[in-house]
Image: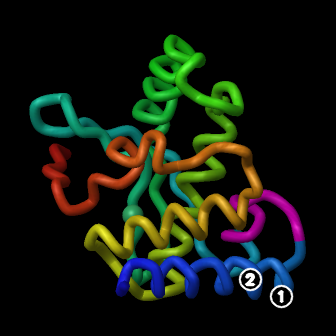
Amino acid sequence: MWSDLLCLEASSLARRVREEHGSGSAGALAARLGVPIIEDCWQVAGGRILNLAECSLRPPEIRLNRQAIADLAVRLAARCECLPHGVPTEEDLIELAVAHELYHLLSGCASGLAVELAAHTFAREVTALPFSPEAFASLLSPHDRREEIQ
Ligand SMILES: [Zn+2]
């Protein structure tokens, strides 16, 4: 299947990136790759779907939605029993969001369900965090449904 293949590739991309750039946070990895991270806050129409982060290719850049990340951390903490490895902190969510966006930048793949799954795979392997981003995938990856209000 296409999505399985993409996830396998994402997995080996994560290993290659770690081999080439060593350990450290996803944020440090982004810095080494020359990708600035911009701290930002934005809202989404209807207030229902929130992006934790987004990226642009030209110039390469990752924007973090700090408000959305803080909100998600609070919501996850309120239902910690659903998560087998406890509750991701705000810092964990930032790591996952940055790594997720790095996948989009490194692979050049922007959107689609298979790409999002691959980005989650990459994020999980690069961060080595014990959380499955799929557990909150709908909040991590609504790229295709984005309606941004400036
Ligand atoms: Zn994505």
Residue 58: image location, x then y, percent = 39, 84
Query: Measuring 23% from the left and 38% from the top, which residue is drawn there?
Result: 49
State the count of labels.
2
Toward which corner of the image does residue 125 lie, by quadrant? Answer: bottom right
Q: Nearer the viewer, residue 24 or 138?
A: 138
Query: Measuring 47% from the left and 41% from the top, which residue is drawn there?
Result: 135
The amino acid type, in three-letter code, at marker 2 is Val
| CA distance separating discs 2 and 1 | 5 Å
Query: Measuring 67% from the left and 41% from the top, which residue is drawn there?
Result: 92
Toward which corner of the image does residue 20 lie, by quadrant? Answer: bottom right
Assign the N terminus to one quadrant of the image.
bottom left
- What crowding class fits label 1: few (fewer than 14 Cα within 10 Å), some (14-19), or many (20 or more)? few
What's the image's color scheme? rainbow
Looking at the picture, does residue 109 appear above or below residue 38? below
Residue 124: image location, x then y, percent = 64, 59
Query: Measuring 40% from the left and 81% from the top, which residue is drawn there?
Result: 57
Residue 56: image location, x then y, percent = 38, 73
| Residue indicated by mark 1 | 20
Residue 124 falls left or right of residue 74: right
Looking at the picture, does residue 17 appear above or below residue 133? below
Q: Is mark 1 within 8 Å of ligand 1?
A: no
- Which mark identifies residue 17? 2
Residue 121: image location, x then y, percent = 56, 66
Residue 60 falls left or right of residue 143: right
Residue bounds of the magenta highlight: 23-30
SS for callout 2: helix
Looking at the picture, does residue 41 appear above or below residue 12? above
